[in-house]
């Protein structure tokens, strides 16, 4: 579940939160980890492959690292740190505060995910640095997450609904 510690901001790779143009390429996937003793709402975040002339795999990786820094996510091989209250549910829709003072991300989620979060359940956020096609299926996504974990190309943390 994580150590429950609050993470101090790591040194940012870019010094700023990625702008809305970059964030528009981030895809979100939700799921539930249900166990006898506890349940966790999961939020996976990754960027689509380069699609614009100024984008590259390297620039996407740099942007996703800055995105993870803005969320105060911790290393994948340590307990997921508590990153503060980042999820808000308004009118039945979950929103992620990712560090930008103006913009939030609407999280597409099933009612069961929203219910668990609204009831105070933890949200485990996982940000992948390597791009993945938006149309990737569950098996391809699972293999990509495992490969990113093996390479250390991800960060994670735990948050709660405000």
Image (tube, rainbow, N blue to C red):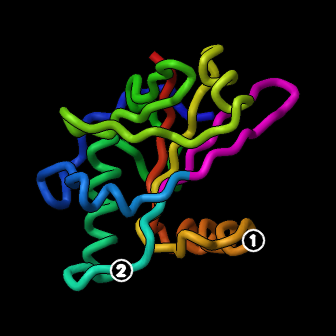
Q: Helix, strand, or loop for circle 1? A: helix
Which residue is more in the foreground, 162 or 114?
114
The rendered magenta stretch, by its main secondary structure, is classed as strand
Horizontal relation, residue 55 to residue 91: left or right: left
Q: Which residue is drawn at the image coordinates 35% and 80% (left, top)?
A: 51
Residue 38 image offset from top left, x and y in percent: 76, 25
- Above or below 99: residue 67: below
Give the farthest residue toward the front.
91
Residue 100 image offset from top left, x and y in percent: 22, 39
Q: Which residue is drawn at the image coordinates 52% and 52% (left, top)?
A: 28
Q: Helix, strand, or loop for circle 2? A: loop
Instruction: List the residue tagged with mark 1.
Output: 139
Horizontal relation, residue 14 to residue 162: left or right: left
- Above or below 3: residue 89: above
Give the farthest residue toward the left.
15
- Above or below 56: residue 32: above
In this picture, which residue range is highlighted in magenta?
A: 29-45
Using the image, tell me which numbered label, if any, was put on residue 50: 2
The question of residue 37 being in magenta is answered with yes
The question of residue 53 being in magenta is answered with no
């Amino acid at each position: 579940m994580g150590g429950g510690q609050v993470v101090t901001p790591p040194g940012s790779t870019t010094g700023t939160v990625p702008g809305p143009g970059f964030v528009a390429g981030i895809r979100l996937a939700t799921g539930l980890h249900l166990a006898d003793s506890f349940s966790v709402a999961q939020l996976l975040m990754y960027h689509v492959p380069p699609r614009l002339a100024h984008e590259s795999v390297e620039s996407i990786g740099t942007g996703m690292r800055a995105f993870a820094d803005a969320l105060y996510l911790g290393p994948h091989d340590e307990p997921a740190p508590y990153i503060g209250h980042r999820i808000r549910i308004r009118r039945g829709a979950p929103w992620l505060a990712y560090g930008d003072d103006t913009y939030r991300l609407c999280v597409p989620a099933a009612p069961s995910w929203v219910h668990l979060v609204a009831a105070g359940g933890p949200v485990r956020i996982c940000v992948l640095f390597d791009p993945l096609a938006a149309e990737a299926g569950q098996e391809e996504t699972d293999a990509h997450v495992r490969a990113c974990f093996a390479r250390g190309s991800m960060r994670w943390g735990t948050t709660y609904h405000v």
